[in-house]
Image: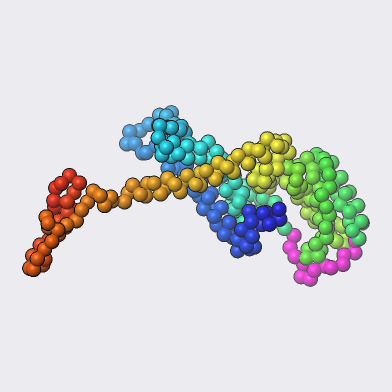
Amino acid sequence: MPFIHRLHYSLALGTVGSYIFGIIALLWTLDCFVGAYITFPPPSQKKRTPKEWLHRWKPSWLVRANKLFSFIFTFHRASGLWIWAMLFVFAWSSVGFNLREVYNPVMKAVFGDTGGHQIEDLDEPLKTPDLSWREAYTIGQNHLAELSKEQGFKVEWERDMRYYPNIGAYILVVNSSLDIGDKFPFTAVYMDGNTGELLRFHAPTGQNTGSTVATWLFRMHMADIKTLGLPYRIFVTLLGIVITFLSVSGVWIWLKKRRKKKPSRKNVKISNNQNGTLNGSDRKNKKPTVQTSGGEKVGAGEL
């Protein structure tokens, strides 16, 4: 499973693979908007009401099954609209996982603080803090008890507590009523390794709009929603199958249309003369002709 996770996250190529996936996720996000736009009805010179515009857009949401190409094309278009919101959630959250250089500025510009601020590294790592692990753990529990009373949340279970020399702090992570998922809790208190002073409190939801939106994006991507449980995980599995179909059918439709645009060699025949041969000076003066499928002959330069 660790290898499957690395393959899914970064093609098992480390940082390089992570950036590759991040760029692909960014293109996928843009494609969500481009794909939706090309389903819109063509512009009309006549001024139309929103109701009339929606009526003209309605066929894009429907599937026609009279022919194979028609079925695949209309199902590709319609299913992309049916699940558009979830496609965007998975695309943009993928950017958040792999391309923070783009994700963080955009989220901050739209929603404000997303809870991404981290404590700055010390000039020199504090390898041996004054507080022991057990002392820091007790202090962390006290901090959480006070915060839960102040902010009205409940601590459900504790995940772990670790010491980070680079910031000289203990971090106690718990699952609380502020977490929307079960597998990966993110309610946490950051404590000074020497004094136990509360340096930072991170709440996955409720603290600000940015962090709440970010938490929902990532938990939905990882199918980790407490209130939805197994049904949502099944839905995400089916969604993955639909996304695979959209990818394959999109390439198939593009190839079919590309082949149709190519001129057919059967319909146009180029000949040097009626008999197909030229002799002597005729080869210098005679211009090649083109015989169309209708039997007419015209100079090649007239096409």
- Residue drawn at x 59%, y 53% is 95
Q: Reply yes or no: does residue 130 show up in magenta.
A: yes
Evaluate whether residue 105 shows in this view: no
Residue 148: name its quadrant.
top right
Q: Does residue 47 appear in this view?
A: yes
Q: Residue at x 51, y 44 (%)?
A: 246
Q: Nearer the viewer, residue 26 or 110?
A: 26
The answer to whether 257 appears left or right of 195 in the picture is left
* Observer-nearest of 66 and 180: 66
Residue 109, magenta (yes or no) = no
x, y percentage for residue 123? 76, 70
User: In the image, residue 224 lies at what x, y percent?
Assistant: 70, 43
- Viewer-proximal residue, 51 or 80? 80
Residue nearest the viewer, comparing 26 with 233: 233
Q: How is the image coloured?
A: rainbow
Q: Which residues are magenta?
A: 119-131
237 w.r.t. 104: above or below? above
Give the number of marks: 0
Q: Residue at x 26, y 52 (%)?
A: 265
Q: Quadrant of residue 46?
A: top left
Q: List x then y, in percent, for residue 71.
A: 44, 36
Looking at this view, name the residue that lies furthest to the left. Answer: 281
Residue 139 x %, y %: 89, 53
- Whether 263 is drawn above or below 60: the answer is below
Instruction: Check the image and name the residue furthest to the bottom.
Output: 124
Viewed as shown, does residue 274 lie left or right of 57? left
Characterize the magenta stretch by its predominant secondary structure.
loop
Residue drawn at x 83%, y 41% as measured from the top left: 156
